[in-house]
């Protein structure tokens, strides 16, 4: 989970992702951020995120992102 938080913080350092229950509703991430984050996650976790899984609900929290990484073949430490 720390690696995901690091990816998020590098992407948007102005936000404290630990204080949000929904990154989308709180406007922490927009569509451009999600596109960038997908590439970062694929590189960090060695997975391939299928385009059909790039939906807002998969980016609302660290846990949702971790689940996305897992179903995409990545390993969360």
Image (cartoon, rainbow, N blue to C red):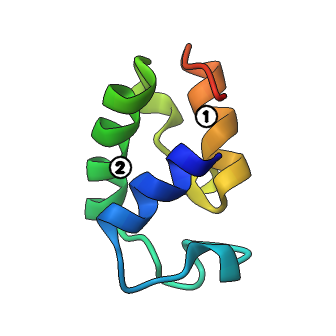
Q: Earlier in the sequence, mark 2 or mark 1?
A: 2
Q: Secondary structure at mark 1?
A: helix
Q: Tell me whether the residue at label 2 lies in contact with that at label 1, contact meaning CB atoms closer than 8 angstroms.
A: no
Q: In the rendered image, which quarter is residue 46 located in?
A: top left
Residue pictured at 59% horizontal, 50% vertical: 2
| Cα–Cα gap, marks 2 and 1 | 12 Å
Instruction: Locate residue 36 relative to residue 48 in the image: left or right.
Output: left
Q: Residues within 10 Å of mark 1 (few under 14, many from 20)?
A: many
Q: In the rendered image, which quarter is residue 60 located in?
A: bottom right
Residue pictured at 48% horizontal, 30% vertical: 52
Q: Is residue 49 above or below residue 38?
A: above
Which numbered disc covers residue 37?
A: 2
The percent coordinates of residue 73 (x first, y second) are 56, 13
Residue pictured at 61% horizontal, 34% vertical: 68
Q: Is residue 32 above or below residue 52?
A: below
Which numbered disc covers residue 68?
A: 1
Q: Nearer the viewer, residue 35 or 52?
A: 35
Residue pictured at 60% horizontal, 45% vertical: 65
Q: Secondary structure at mark 2?
A: helix
Which numbered disc covers residue 27?
A: none
The percent coordinates of residue 39 (x first, y second) are 28, 37
The percent coordinates of residue 44 (x first, y second) are 38, 31
Instruction: Locate residue 27 relative to residue 11 in the image: left or right.
Output: right
Q: Nearer the viewer, residue 53 or 16?
A: 16
Q: Nearer the viewer, residue 12 or 52?
A: 12
Of all residues, the one furthest to the top in this rendering is 73
Q: In the rendered image, which quarter is residue 41 located in?
A: top left
| Quadrant in which the C terminus appears | top right
Q: Is residue 21 above or below residue 7?
A: below
């Amino acid at each position: 989970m720390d690696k995901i938080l690091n990816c998020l913080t590098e992407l948007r350092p102005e936000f404290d992702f630990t204080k949000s229950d929904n990154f989308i509703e709180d406007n922490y991430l927009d569509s451009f951020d999600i596109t960038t984050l997908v590439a970062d996650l694929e590189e960090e976790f060695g997975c391939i995120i299928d385009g059909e899984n790039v939906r807002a609900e998969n980016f609302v929290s660290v846990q949702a992102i971790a689940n996305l990484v897992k179903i995409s073949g990545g390993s969360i430490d």
